[in-house]
Image (cartoon, coloured by chain):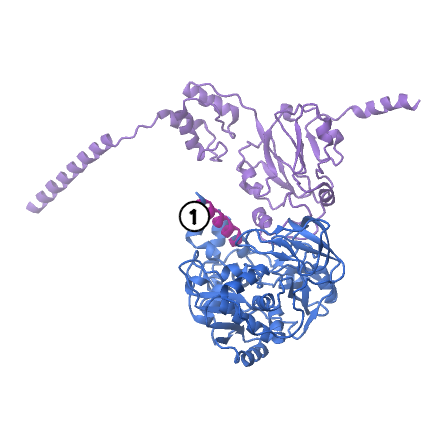
């Protein structure tokens, strides 16, 4: 079975919520929409305090080419445009909407009927995706329309759909495939049409045999789409790892991007969002969020409106367990520990993981014993122990030479370290510093 | 016999040619270095702290000699004494400089600023600052991992385990500014040491709006502006929800300290206040 070539780890899968069907979560009392919930320029509010909005009303315009519009997920009145504490504990500008009823914008097709036929031109599809504020739903939130507009000189050859869900615990994509397979496949065909390619792959790890089987059955009716079962290995959901696993091509070090080897990678959730945006005229304002954890009473998958506070999801899953040690936004490998659980669900919130006290505790940091486990675990072929030391010593030039910017921050090194060294913490610091230096140099 | 002779002669010849080349090179490529650079370097503290803005002590010595005047040059570690010595060597006038000291502008001790979460990542302020807002609701205050302590070359800054905040030893501090650069939150400021070591400053860097800052910490500046009104010397400004006392204008009258409702303004090394005796005296006639 296929997988990527170097590195990788296999953390305990813990897919506790895999059997829980997607439930629709109730409306929040107040929805909060941070203005930067995607990579790129923050969105610019196009509503003011006191404005009445409906479900699907645009409340913020894209702030540039690499940016995305934001749509209201609720109907009601704009309470204020103020700052909100985000997951990291810093204040970021956001739009607050007091919920009143549930009135949708006209033109959004709310029926469940599957629409397959699309007569739009590729450019029109991209335009529709852009106007619906669709971003990568895997977590990085890169605006989708940007990926579909290849830079001059490069040409897309295939679309690869990331349905790997290699993060332990998370099951949002898994459930989506089981419940909306046809919609996803139509979404993939739309992405293929938009990228002007006739080959599409959907990579699924083989810990989801039911999803693989179902998708294979349904995909037979869609020409050009192939389901690729993959061996379970983290971080297979990384763009570069997935390209390596599916079409055996290697993306060179930055500034090269996936399109340099002819691949356009999109998340399976994005494919679904594209289907809804293009075929149903429904902008991106809701997503599936997994709420899970070993002590959680009812691990669930919720269809959640954006802007809902995480505390409401936790409540719906049976409340915060008494032995909670950490609440993590996202999966256990790449997610971020939350400073407060009132933070709103954003476009990239794939899960809420509640770890118990014992699980959450980091081990005592001991000296590096030069075992090189981190080196063999690194999927990018880097030397994490060295990068972390260079970062600690502020040796930025050397860190740049050692390709610190190639790090995908997957955390495999830190996961595998027998001395519990905070390798990724230090590398992340070094990476952002070196990227700043490179940016300053190219600006000169 | 012949063999030995050939060896001696050829080696001798090589030696001679090499000597000539070396002699010519040493004359032709000689670089004249002002002997005063070495002399100046000798009186510097050799801490290589970089506080002067030059790469190490020898860099500063060279700059002093080449500049031809000592205007704007100060070795913070050596202080005025070192500058006088340099002036004597170079026959120049040392610029009168005010002694300075590093000031930590955060009073968010464990008691004043309750910890709401626990940070367990790498023990480095830079990493903590990049990953989260810290352990408290204040996203501006001290993170307490001690980056400033580890960069100090003069052992002048220490963590107080009780408050969780760094404390500067004013006698040891040379105001080289290494801690200022190390702090990712720009909490530390180099301020004039003041007469008799007396200083008045805003002991807070929180730029949140009043109510938010008030919730986060007992002694945060809430930008109420009382100090601005009280100050007779226009030394205080409020910008971005934070008051700042300009040390150049401050006359150390301590009026602002008295009016600050949050005790965010502190005055250090002053004798205890007398007005406590005065206050009842002025109130007494009113009561009668």
- Chain letter for the blue part: A
Quarter location, residue A209? bottom right
Query: In the rendered structure, does residue A232 fall within the stretch colored magenta?
Result: no
Which residue is tagged 1? Answer: A397
For the residue pair A175 and B20, the one nearer the viewer reads as: A175
Residue A163 is left or right of residue A262, and the answer is right
Residue that sits furthest to the right in the current view:
B288
Q: Where is residue A175 in the image (x, y as percent from the top left)?
A: 63, 73
For the residue pair A120 and B167, the one nearer the viewer reads as: A120
Q: In the rendered view of the protein, which quadrant contains the C terminus of chain A?
A: top left
Secondary structure under badge 1? helix
Q: Position of residue B257 (x, y in %)?
A: 72, 30
Q: Position of residue B254 (x, y in %)?
A: 71, 26
Residue that sits furthest to the left in the current view:
B2
Residue B118 is left or right of residue A135, and the answer is right
Query: What range is drawn magenta here?
Result: A427-442
- Density class for disc 1 (Cα within 10 Å; few <14, some 14-19, many ≥20) is few
For the residue pair B2 and B64, the one nearer the viewer reads as: B64
Chain B hue? purple
Is residue B1 in sight in this rendering?
Answer: no
- The residue lying at 66 percent from left, 53 percent from top is B118
Question: What secondary structure is the stretch in magenta mostly built from?
Answer: helix
Q: Where is residue B239 in the image (x, y as percent from the top left)?
A: 65, 35
């Amino acid at each position: 079975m296929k997988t990527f070539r170097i590195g990788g780890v296999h953390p305990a899968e813990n897919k506790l919520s895999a059997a829980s069907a997607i439930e629709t979560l109730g409306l929040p009392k107040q929805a909060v929409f941070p203005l930067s919930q995607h990579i790129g320029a923050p969105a610019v509010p196009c509503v003011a305090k006191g404005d009445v909005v409906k479900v699907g009303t645009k409340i913020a315009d894209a702030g540039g080419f690499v940016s995305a519009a934001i749509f209201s997920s609720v109907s009601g009145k704009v309470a204020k445009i103020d700052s909100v504490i985000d997951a990291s504990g810093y204040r970021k500008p956001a739009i607050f909407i007091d919920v009143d009823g549930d009135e949708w914008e006209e033109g959004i097709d709310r029926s469940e009927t599957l629409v397959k036929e699309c007569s739009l031109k590729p450019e029109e599809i991209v335009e529709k995706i852009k106007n619906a504020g669709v971003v990568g739903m895997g977590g990085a939130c890169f605006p989708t329309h940007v990926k579909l507009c290849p830079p001059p000189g490069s040409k897309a050859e295939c679309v690869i759909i990331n349905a790997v869900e290699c993060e332990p615990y998370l099951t949002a994509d898994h459930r989506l495939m089981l419940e909306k397979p046809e919609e996803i496949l139509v979404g993939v065909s739309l992405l293929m049409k938009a990228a002007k390619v006739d080959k599409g792959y959907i990579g699924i790890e083989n810990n989801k045999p039911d999803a693989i089987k179902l998708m294979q059955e349904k995909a037979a009716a869609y020409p050009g789409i192939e389901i690729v079962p993959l061996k379970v290995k983290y971080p297979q959901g990384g763009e570069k790892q997935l390209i390596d696993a599916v079409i055996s091509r290697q993306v060179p070090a930055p500034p090269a991007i996936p399109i340099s080897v002819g691949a356009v990678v999109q998340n399976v959730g994005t494919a679904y969002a594209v289907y809804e945006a293009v075929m149903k005229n429904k902008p991106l304002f809701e997503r599936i969020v997994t709420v899970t954890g070993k002590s959680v009473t009812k691990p669930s998958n919720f269809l959640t409106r954006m802007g809902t506070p995480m505390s409401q999801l936790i409540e719906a899953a049976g409340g915060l367990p008494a032995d909670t040690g950490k609440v993590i936004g996202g999966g256990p490998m790449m997610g971020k520990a939350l400073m407060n659980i009132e933070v709103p669900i954003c476009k990239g919130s794939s899960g809420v993981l509640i770890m118990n006290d014992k699980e959450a505790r980091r081990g005592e940091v001991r000296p590096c014993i030069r075992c090189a486990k981190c080196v063999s675990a690194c999927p990018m072929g880097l030397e994490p122990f060295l990068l972390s030391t260079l970062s600690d010593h502020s040796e930025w030039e050397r860190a740049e030479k050692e390709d610190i910017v190639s790090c995908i921050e997957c955390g495999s090194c830190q996961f595998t370290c027998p001395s519990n060294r905070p390798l990724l913490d230090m590398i992340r610091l070094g990476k952002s510093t070196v990227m700043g230096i490179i940016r300053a140099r190219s600006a000169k | 016999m012949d063999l030995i002779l050939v060896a001696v002669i050829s080696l001798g010849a090589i030696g001679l040619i090499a000597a000539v080349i070396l002699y010519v090179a040493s004359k032709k490529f000689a670089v004249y270095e002002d002997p005063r650079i070495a002399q100046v370097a000798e009186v510097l503290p050799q801490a290589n702290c970089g506080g002067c803005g030059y790469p190490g002590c020898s860099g500063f010595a060279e700059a002093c000699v080449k500049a031809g005047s000592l205007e704007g040059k100060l070795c913070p570690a050596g202080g005025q004494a070192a500058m006088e010595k340099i002036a004597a060597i170079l026959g120049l006038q040392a610029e009168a400089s005010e002694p300075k000291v590093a000031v930590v502008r955060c009073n968010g001790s464990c008691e004043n600023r309750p910890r709401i979460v626990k940070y367990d990542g790498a023990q480095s302020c830079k990493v903590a600052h990049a990953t989260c807002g810290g352990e408290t609701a204040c996203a501006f205050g001290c993170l307490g991992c001690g980056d400033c302590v580890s960069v100090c070359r003069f052992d002048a800054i220490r963590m107080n385990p009780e408050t969780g905040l760094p404390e500067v030893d004013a006698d040891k501090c040379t105001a080289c500014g290494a801690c200022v650069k190390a702090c990712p939150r720009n909490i530390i400021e180099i301020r004039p040491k003041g007469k008799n070591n007396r200083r008045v400053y805003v002991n807070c860097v929180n730029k949140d709006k009043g109510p938010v800052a008030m919730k986060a910490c007992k002694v945060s500046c809430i930008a109420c502006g009382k100090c601005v009104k009280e100050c007779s010397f226009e030394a205080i400004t409020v910008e971005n929800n934070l008051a700042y006392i300009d040390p150049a204008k401050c006359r150390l009258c301590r009026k602002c300290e008295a009016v600050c409702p949050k005790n965010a303004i502190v005055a250090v090394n002053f004798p205890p206040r007398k007005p406590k005796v005065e206050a009842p005296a002025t109130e007494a006639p009113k009561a009668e």
